[in-house]
Image: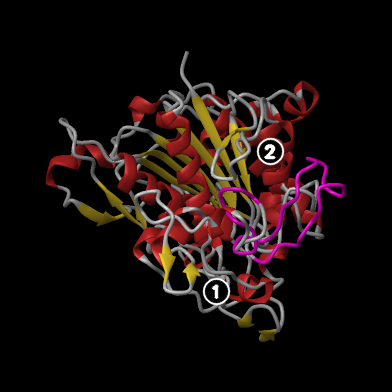
Amino acid sequence: MTRVFTIFNHGTAYHRDKAPDEVVTQLSDAVFGAEARLVPSGPDPSYWSLANANPTHLICDGPGSDDIDALSSSSGQRHAHPGKLNPIFDHDKGGHVSQLGLDPRGKKSHGLFGKRKPAGFLKDFVGDTPKNGKLMGKALGTGWDDNVYKAVYLVTHLQSQGQKPDVINMVGWSRGGVTCLKMANKLCEVFGETIPVNIFAIDPVPGGITKITDDMRIIPANVKNYLAVLALDDMRGTFMPTDRHVLKVRVNTRKPARIPYVQFLPLPGTHADVTGAGKSAEAKNSGMLTLHLAWKFLSIHGTRFADIAKVRRWDLSAKEVVNIYARLFAKMPAISAKKGTLVSASGGLRKERHVRAHRSEYVRDSELFINEHHRQCCLYPAYHPDTHVEMRNTLPSMPREALVPPMMSDLCQMGIFY
């Protein structure tokens, strides 16, 4: 049986106990199995083991999110913004584990005046990474590297227990969507291409004046499928998404070479609307489609869900999907007209997104369809992937690293038929 591990990455200021209608929260609440976390396993604080012998998933709270105690959390587990707690052990940084005074060989380290604290590398090694404040997390995403560290460390621990995942699925919104790529790049660095990764990114936005680093803009060779939903109508200048004119793909090293299946799906509405967390009327329809697509994407690639009642609501028929798209399509001019103020406190100067100005780069027949999923559902069941010539047929001439071509792959190649 294929061992599938799923990672849920929340957006800025969001966490597992906030906004129950938001897509990442709904999915993580309904997932099957236990969350991966470490607990003390002996009298010596350096001994830790998995709380559950066969964990299936990990939930990462967003940068700048609240500090929630165990009694107030629906999961019964304390959590806070990344950068506040030790990313491995979930207790306050600078605690007993990082004060063991061990040198890199595992022996006690003593200075002239008694035991001295571990060196920087050793402190980082046990999760005592630099502390980050909530405000900087909101402004710059500071601390999200702790989420990357947490995910990769746990996968490494699973491997040491003979439970290395065969597949890793990820879903994330906003900075959580960007975090998915950061994690994929680090996993590729540690495990090479041995663990296939599938990513569903919901309006991936680095935010503010955050510096765009390579691990935010490169789809590494271990990624098999990358599907992103993009909000068409968010006009905040500091909320520019990483879309096809920003991201680059890397061809894997296997023979024959393979590039990831990549698709971007524009949806009407704002950054919050497309994940169901918005307050406008569009949020319900756009959020419903995003939830359907995210659930379908994860399920097709092996993630199991335990809440059957929720799953039935998410499992829309092709006809239902087309009807939702029809309602959104009819409202697109009115939605697009809501440009907001010239300057906003949270988003800076107003600016039009590339995907909104050049939607024809993301969908064939853009005057008839919102995105390729909309188009595909309207053609269903007559639709067949062989009717289209794929960009990947030119793969031998592609460079090792290249910008994502327009409409590079087809949703059917990902298993998304409707």
In three-dimensional space, the C-alpha distance between marks 1 and 2, rounded to whole angstroms, equals 32 Å
Residue 243 showing in the rendered view = no
Farthest residue to the left: give it: 397
Is residue 343 inside the magenta stretch?
no
Q: Nearer the viewer, residue 85 or 203?
A: 85
Q: Nearer the viewer, residue 392 or 20?
A: 20
Residue 99 showing in the rendered view = yes
Q: Position of residue 143 (x, y in %)?
A: 56, 65
- Type of amino acid at the residue the image marks with label 1: Glu
Is residue 67 inside the magenta stretch?
yes
Mark 1 nearby-residue class (10 Å; few <14, some 14–19, many ≥20)? some
In the drawing, does residue 186 fall left or right of residue 294? left
Mark 2 nearby-residue class (10 Å; few <14, some 14–19, many ≥20)? many
Tell me the residue that label 1 is attached to: 352
Which image quarter is the C terminus in? top right
Q: Position of residue 136 (x, y in %)?
A: 61, 76
Q: Position of residue 231 (x, y in %)?
A: 60, 59
Farthest residue to the right: give it: 71
Establish if 256 lies above or below 100: above
Q: How is the image coloured?
A: secondary structure
Q: Residue at x 38, y 50 (%)?
A: 186
Tell me the residue that label 2 is attached to: 28
Q: Position of residue 212 (x, y in %)?
A: 41, 70
Establish if 97 lies above or below 345: above
Q: Residue at x 47, y 61 (%)?
A: 123
Secondary structure beneath dot 2 equals: helix
Residue range (magenta): 64-90
Establish if 271 lies above or below 69: below
- Type of amino acid at the residue the image marks with label 2: Ser
